[in-house]
Image (cartoon, grey):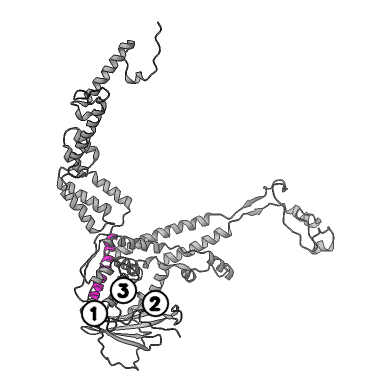
Amino acid sequence: MPNLFSKLSYPHANDHHNNGVSDFKKSIPHDENHDIDFTSLTHPSYDTNITDWDRYRAVFEGGRDFVNRYLIRFSKRELDCDFADRKKLTYVPSHARTSVLEMRNAIFKRLVDIKRLGGPTTYQTAINGIGGGVDRIGSSMNSFMGIKVLTELMTLTRVGVYIDKPAIPEGATLQDVDRLNLQPFLYHYKAEDIRSWGRDSITGELTSVLLRDHSYLIDDFTGLPIGWEPRYRFLRKLDDNLIMVRLYDKNNILTEEHFLELPRIPMVIGEIGESIITDVVDHQIALLNLASSDMSYSIKSNFPFYIEQFDPQSEMLNNLTGSFDGEPEIDEDGNETAEGTSLSANQARSKSISSGPSTGRGYAAGLNAPAFIHPSSEPLKASMAKQNEIKKEIRELVSLSVSGLAEGSGLEAGLAYLGLQLEAMERGIAEVWAAYEGGEAASVSYPSDYQLKSDKERLEIAKEELSFVDKIPSLTYQKEMAKDVVNITLGHKTDSATLKKMCDEIEESTIVVIDTSVIDTDLENGLVDMETASLARGYPKGAVKKAHEERLAKATAMMLAQSKFGGSVGPDNGGARGIPEVALEPEKDAKEEKDVSQRQASEIDGESRTRKEDAKPRQRRKE
């Protein structure tokens, strides 16, 4: 027989349930014959929302289940076989899901800026995905909250996170604890599995909660799951530091009872007022049926029809005389049927025709030539245009729903509201984690800025701001504008420590304008020294001195090389010899040498030539 409960089990795949921070046990009397059916017990709010939750999940997850549930027949005249064929060709236009994920990712990008300070060592290790992470499968806290929790919160309005910890075996050492990874871990509950709950009327703290687990049935021999069945977990706070946990099977039979020495129920529930896809569920269903209709129309209408006009009088005469222009009749043996035979008389004549590049068709005078026609594409175009409108509406309505979370304060405010809900949940997680491990809870702080702009849009804004940096003669203004540009371009994808370092570097700099053309012009005009220009370009201190030394060494080497061939290099001709470092007037030296060469050339042929003219082939002068 399969083993239903394992000591290491998960809520949606054999959920951990043998937990505790000590071996403390207390007998709580309970009525074995109680009349509470935990398998059917639900909160009134649960009963009100379960139908909507079912629709939200179907729209968001899509798949064939969504098609099977929401694809409808054209009419009663559509046959079962036609409807089945159309259903096979129908795809899921998951535009609602895409819009939700776009909003989620806007928040997810900012999770790198979350500050989680302090807390137990196991907490700091787990939130970075080390040692099994926060969920024993290697997830960091950012990925767990941003992918699993946030997605459920946005689509189903409610999600729960359970903080669990395996029981420490009797006589276990600290080395055993580390080896077995007996530290707290997390798993989430979907809205449909948070069956009922109770809260303190003053503090709002959970006083009891009923959860539904999905437990795998494990085969004893293979250790593999062979099915699953529901199990119900009931938690109730009995005292300031005592939590009762009871587990019931699908038949409402109590299978286990244990107690936790914790100040609060190890469960946090996040909730928003309304799903952000509330207003687009019907849009998605309508889009599904339009897309299915278009696909069927495109496939069934993707062939032409042959038409040929005829003269009714000629057709009647042909019928009376028995003449026809179609294919000859074929008997059972494959032979052509002779005219006038009983077989010919008793069989309907074929109206098929032969056509092709070597076969022509005759038609009566005054009639249009035979042609091929096809169904009009106008209905398909109209349907596709309507689908595009629906797609656009879905995206707009999802954005408006997010804005509505912050009472219409805007999209970014709505995203910030979702961030605050995650922050509240994480603080509760940190408190329970610290209660398990002992010590102070970690402090958690989420970012407040969630902008939905593409990198291209951010770069355009940054360019616009940079164009004003050197227009105001205030170093403080220039520095603040530079910091703003850094936040616009990198604030959404860089952690706060790196951003702070960038801003500190801007604050410490003495020059903010770093346009190379401006710096080169100022240097040429003598408005700035080499050292300051070098620092403005971002080069380290002392770079000018090193560069000057290297240039002098290079000039010295060139002078020595030229002197070996009888040349002389000095302050009066350094520019002409390609060594401006030793010249008093480098440009003047080069000009004077050019003038001398031109004079020498004119003495040969009596003409003054430029260098360009010298490049032309000279003609021999006739004597």
User: Which numbered disc flags the more N-terminal residue, 3 or 1?
Assistant: 3
Q: Find out whether the residues at labels 2 and 1 contact each other: C-beta distance under 8 Å.
A: no
Instruction: Please identify, in this view, whether the residue under mark 2 or under mark 1 is nearer the observer.
Output: 2
Please state if 306 lies on the left or on the right of 444 as rendered.
right
Q: Nearer the viewer, residue 164 or 100?
A: 164
Residue under label 1, please give it.
264
Q: Nearer the viewer, residue 241 or 297?
A: 241
Q: Residues within 10 Å of mark 3 (few under 14, many from 20)?
A: many
Q: Position of residue 426 (x, y in %)?
A: 26, 70
Which label number is shown at residue 13?
A: 2
Q: Is residue 421 magenta?
A: yes
Quadrant of res 82: bottom right
Residue 408 appears in the figure: no
Using the numbered discs, state the Cα–Cα distance from disc 2 to disc 1 in whole angstroms.
Answer: 25 Å
Residue under label 3, please give it.
186
Q: Which SS class for mark 3?
A: strand
Q: Residue drawn 40% across and 70% down?
A: 57
What is the magenta range? 411-434
Quadrant of res 404: bottom left
Residue 494 appears in the figure: yes
Q: Is residue 423 magenta?
A: yes
Q: Position of residue 273 (x, y in %)?
A: 30, 70
Q: Nearer the viewer, residue 309 or 481?
A: 481
Using the numbered discs, state the Cα–Cα distance from disc 3 to disc 2 in whole angstroms.
Answer: 14 Å
Question: What amino acid does circle 1 point to?
Answer: Arg
User: Which numbered disc flags the more N-terminal residue, 3 or 2?
Assistant: 2
